[in-house]
Image: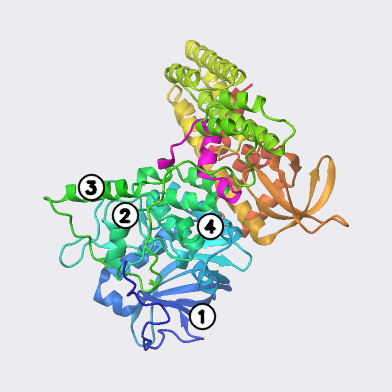
């Protein structure tokens, strides 16, 4: 690749025109404080909303662009409306969109949004070159949560990059700039914007856009995953995955070039983050994560040093081939090339001309990307091999848990490596039971025979086989009993049992599927209405969970918790789906972060939720609170549900609880 692209330092200095607005000027009810940003489409000011007496960021569309092409104004308004739909703690919130007239008579479009007192991830990269592991974990967790929420409301950002990820002084990650955001697309509704020559426009930043964006194809949430992967690659290595002399060449690289290995670019790179970057950078959308929640799970695993391959074998109990994470270089190039050839009449089509946002930052770094090598994974870091454990490692990697158990029985039980291996085997067996158990719990009669065959084919320890077969037969009896009685009351009881299992594991994302699957067999019209409300419970609770996590990360509230029956004053640091991180305030306690599982800690959840929902300006806060407390199976849920007794959600939960008895 060429190294002709100029850096920020070597670009010729431009003479900037005067800002549109001056400090102290009032526009549309906002008093301007200072210019804080300027781009190709307009300017951003720090301002004060007079009616609410609050600081905001005020984004003004360039009047010149609006006059030149009305589509700019349309896109500008769509940005505000798209952002307005995304009320989430990890997404910058839009307050208002309107127009105003300047003193010279020019009409301007503007919108106001949450003011972020902090800096962008690009600022961090400019200062440090690359991010630390803990910084990467912080950024990836916030962006993954934001993209998961956006995907669930059907919005694709299309411009995820370091410039558009902000970090507040309190450490909260916020996704910014939805100027290119659009509804998720399919082939049927895809109608790309076109230039004067009728060519499809490519929207996005070339260094980070997905292959489907580069080819002006339909995009969905998996396109944002790719851009996040390119961003993660930059955070790990200090540079974007592909560089070239011009935007068009970079776009071709995203479509055709082998996926570079972050560890080859930066040998000290963390294997877990590197493997996740490669998975997100897969050329085909179907080879990335199917579900946004799978992305969140992978990010949480990488934050704990768990690679995708380790995560997969823990969850599924069989080996995920290495090519699942690493695309073979020549094969990917060949397939992509012939896919492009197939679109034309024997010759590769020209990629559409890109629209390059003005914040694009080319760099002279020209390390040629190399194809990622396939092959077996190295042993886990920190777990040195021991005599007799080679067979164990191979069996565990292949998902042959029965063989791994047999190999472990012959190893020296006094060695630390054997103890570690035993823990890994226990974790793999537990995760297997949890994963297959969840599938069995939601299975219908037609699925159970296939599950029985699948379980029998797995090389599992005898006790796991017995447990799974027993679980399948118990589910078969439940399904048969409900079907034979044909009563909605029995179906309610069966649904309650399934939902209780999801509540026990905070399976927010599974609630809708469980309810919708059960709804097929219900007969009463009012039952159908209740089930429609129940299907939204998971999304409501997930909104509350996100707000609570954001509040804790930003405010670090001091509270009293109960651990092992004793009261303990702590400062909360972080909350995940499974763990609580805190610093003990007990006299003489070390000022280090400790953690406990959520089930081991008694906390004032209702009070914390109230503060979090208010702090994050969450809509429908009473319903979100009730959904969370019910999902967490807390006694306070009864009071919260009484407060919203007339809502469909409360009535649906009441019907469920009435029929579970």
Q: To which residue does mark 2 refer?
A: 211
Q: Earlier in the sequence, mark 1 or mark 3?
A: 1
Where does residue 283 sit, x and y in percent of width and height? 34, 50
Of badges 4 and 1, nearer the viewer stands: 4
Which type of secondary structure does the marked residue at label 3 adopt?
Answer: helix
Magenta stretch secondary structure, dominant: helix
Image quadrant holding the N terminus, namely: bottom left
Q: CA distance from mark 2 to mark 1?
A: 43 Å
Disc 2 crowd rating (10 Å Cα; few below 14, some 14-19, many 20+) is many
Report x, y in % for residue 205.
36, 65
Task: Identify the image quadrant of residue 437.
Answer: top right
Answer yes or no: do the residues labelled 4 and 2 have beta carbons within 8 Å?
Answer: no
* Mark in the foreground, 1 or 3: 3
Upstream in sequence: badge 4 or badge 3: 4
- State which region is magenta: 301-323
Q: Residue at x 85, y 43 (%)?
A: 566
Residue on which the image places disc 4: 269
Q: Are marks 4 and 3 in contact (CB under 8 Å)?
A: no
Q: Are marks 1 and 3 in contact (CB under 8 Å)?
A: no
Residue under numbered circle 3:
339
Label 1: element kind: strand
Q: Residue at x 40, y 88 (%)?
A: 18
Element type at mark 4: loop
Give how far across and how far down residue 334 sits, in percent.
26, 48
Q: Is residue 175 visible?
A: no
Q: Nearer the viewer, mark 4 or mark 3?
A: 4
Q: Nearer the viewer, residue 445 or 282?
A: 282
Distance, label 1 to label 3, CA atoms, is: 54 Å
Please name the residue that numbered disc 1 is placed on.
31
Res. 560 visible in picture: yes
Q: Quadrant of the C terminus?
A: top right
Position of 536 relative to 266 (above/below): above
């Amino acid at each position: 690749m060429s190294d002709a692209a100029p850096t920020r330092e070597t670009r010729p200095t431009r003479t900037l025109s005067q800002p549109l607005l001056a400090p102290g000027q009032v526009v549309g009810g906002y008093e301007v404080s200072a210019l804080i940003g300027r781009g190709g489409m307009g300017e951003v000011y720090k301002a004060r909303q007079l009616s609410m007496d609050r600081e905001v960021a005020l984004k003004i569309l360039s009047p010149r662009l609006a006059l030149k092409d009305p589509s700019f104004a349309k896109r500008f308004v769509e940005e505000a409306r798209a952002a307005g739909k995304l009320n989430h703690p990890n997404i910058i919130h839009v307050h208002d969109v309107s127009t105003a007239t300047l003193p010279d008579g020019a009409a301007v479009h503007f919108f106001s949004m949450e003011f972020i007192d902090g800096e962008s991830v690009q600022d961090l990269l400019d200062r440090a070159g690359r991010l630390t592991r803990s910084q990467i974990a912080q950024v990836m967790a916030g962006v993954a949560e934001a993209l998961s929420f956006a995907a669930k409301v059907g919005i694709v950002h299309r411009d995820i990059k370091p410039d558009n990820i902000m970090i507040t002084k309190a450490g909260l990650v916020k996704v910014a700039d939805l100027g290119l955001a659009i509804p998720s697309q399919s082939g049927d509704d895809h109608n790309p914007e076109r230039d004067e020559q009728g060519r499809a426009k490519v929207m996005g930043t070339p260094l980070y856009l997905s292959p489907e964006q580069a080819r002006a194809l339909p995009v969905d949430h998996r396109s944002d995953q790719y851009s996040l992967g390119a961003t993660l690659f930059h955070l790990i290595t200090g540079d974007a995955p592909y560089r070239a002399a011009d935007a068009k060449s970079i776009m071709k690289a995203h479509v055709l070039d082998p996926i570079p290995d972050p560890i080859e670019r930066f040998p000290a790179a963390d294997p877990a983050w590197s493997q996740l970057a490669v998975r997100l950078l897969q050329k085909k959308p179907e080879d990335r994560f199917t579900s946004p929640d799978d992305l969140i799970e992978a990010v949480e695993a990488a934050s704990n040093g768990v690679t995708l391959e380790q995560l997969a074998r823990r969850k599924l109990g069989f080996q995920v081939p290495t090519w699942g994470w690493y695309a073979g270089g020549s094969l990917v190039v060949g397939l992509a090339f012939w896919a492009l050839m197939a679109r034309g009449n024997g010759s590769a089509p020209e990629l559409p001309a890109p629209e390059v946002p003005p914040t694009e930052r080319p760099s002279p770094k020209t390390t040629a990307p190399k194809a990622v090598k396939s092959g077996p994974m190295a042993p886990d870091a920190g777990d040195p091999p021991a005599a007799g454990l080679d067979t164990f490692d191979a069996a565990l990697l292949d998902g042959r848990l029965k063989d791994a158990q047999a190999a472990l029985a012959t190893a020296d039980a006094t060695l630390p490596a054997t103890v570690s291996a035993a823990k890994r085997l226990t974790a793999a067996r537990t995760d297997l039971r949890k994963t297959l158990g969840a599938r069995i719990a939601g299975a219908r009669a037609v699925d159970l025979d296939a599950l029985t065959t699948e379980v029998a084919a797995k090389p599992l320890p005898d006790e796991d086989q017995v447990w799974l077969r027993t679980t399948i037969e118990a589910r078969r009896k439940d399904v048969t009993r409900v079907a034979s009685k044909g009563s909605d009351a029995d179906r309610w009881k069966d649904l309650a049992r399934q939902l209780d299992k999801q509540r026990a594991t905070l399976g927010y994302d599974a609630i809708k599927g469980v309810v919708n699957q059960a709804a097929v067999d219900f007969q009463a019209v009012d039952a159908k209405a209740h089930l429609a409300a129940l299907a939204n419970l998971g999304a409501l609770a997930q909104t509350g969970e996100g707000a609570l996590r954001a509040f804790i990360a930003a405010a670090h509230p001091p509270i009293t918790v109960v651990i092992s029956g004793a009261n303990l004053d702590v400062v909360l640091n972080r909350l995940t789906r499974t763990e609580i991180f805190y610093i003990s305030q007990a006299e003489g306690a070390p000022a280090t972060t400790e953690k406990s599982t959520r089930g081991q800690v008694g906390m004032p959840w209702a009070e914390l939720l109230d503060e979090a929902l208010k702090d994050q300006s969450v809509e429908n806060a009473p319903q979100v609170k009730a959904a969370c407390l019910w999902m967490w199976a807390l006694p306070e849920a009864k009071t919260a549900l009484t407060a919203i007794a007339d809502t469909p959600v409360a009535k649906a939960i009441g019907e469920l609880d009435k029929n579970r008895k």
